[in-house]
Amino acid sequence: MSVCNLCPRRCGADRSAPGAPGAYCHSENELKVARAALHFWEEPCISGKEGSGAVFFSGCSMQCVYCQNHDIAKSQRGQVISVERLTDIFYELCDKGANNINLVTPDHYIPQVIKAIKSAKDKGFSLPFLMNCSGYETVEQIKALDGLIDIYLPDFKYMEPDLAAKYSNAPDYPEVAKSAIAEMVRQCSSQVLDRRGIMTRGVIVRHLLLPGHVLNSKKVVRYLYETYGDSITISIMDQYTPIKGIGDDYPELARRCRPSEYERLVDFAINLGVKNAYTQDGSVAKESFIPDFGDQGVLPEK
């Protein structure tokens, strides 16, 4: 952590020094978690009826201007915990009936997360581990997780570098995401579901439609399908919700997607031949689907 190059930003921050966070992730060396609880709003094969054991890490190297989880993305929420506490959280979520351990945006804590997973697995922990991430990860990061992660759930946000630069200050996002997802698929190419229809191994790639940007979305879906066919699941999302004040600097993002925009994207995917996919009802675009980041489940119960 003394010269941090974990993420594609490669900012070189000395995150080992107190008060010296990463330039984008806003995170220091110590693990910081904002929520650890059962989560029921992932894809059906992830949440099921029992829920996904979601651990929301504070900080994010993307810093998208429209991020619905902006409070934790800027590391303004959360509690500092040890690697040992993170391992304990895995067991607590398992005891609550979780289908899996869902690591949400853990990439800037990869060394600590690896230690926690190995510690759990060495003790016989059997739930699948899932990496829920932005797609903006280095291949080195993903290779370090080989054999530890059972399910990858990355985003593929942009095929247009200009959009990636405008909304995430990451013009290299398309190429970075292509390489990262290729490595994820190499590791978990065979999708496996249990008798309940819950995924225990595989790759689901998410794409969120942004208002006014159907063309970018079509390019993403085309790339994913032409590259991987139905060996991966494509989750085409219609839950974009404008955050407060977004219209001041990005007026085009101050509205939800029109039903006609999403219908055009879904029809495009169907005509392309996509079969292994999830779609959403427009009613999911609600603030109520954003979790309450009140440190639930992070600290030990007294």
Image (cartoon, rainbow, N blue to C red):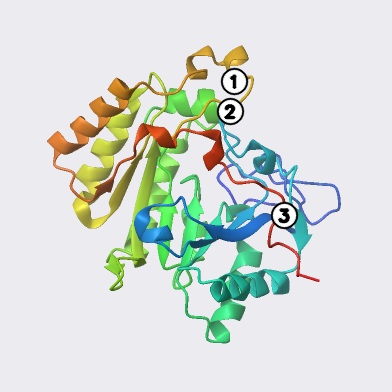
Residue 32 badge: none
Residue 246 badge: 1
Q: Could you say where residue 181 lies in the image, as x and y percent from the top left?
A: 38, 51
Residue in the image at 61% along x and 79% along y: 119
Residue in the image at 35% along x and 59% along y: 45
* Residue 10 occupies quadrant: top right
Determine contact: label 1, label 2, CB under 8 Å: yes
Q: Quadrant of the N terminus?
A: bottom right
* Residue 96 occupies quadrant: bottom right
Decide which of 89, 10 is in the foreground and name it: 89
**Please, what is the three-letter code of the amino acid marked with disc 2?**
Val
Residue in the image at 67% along x and 69% along y: 86
Q: Earlier in the sequence, mark 1 or mark 3?
A: 1
**Please, what is the three-letter code of the amino acid marked with disc 3?**
Asp
**Cα–Cα gap, marks 1 and 3:** 26 Å
Q: Earlier in the sequence, mark 3 or mark 2?
A: 2
Mark 2: secondary structure:
loop
Q: Which residue is mark 2?
A: 65
Look at the picture and state if 24 lies above or below 37.
above
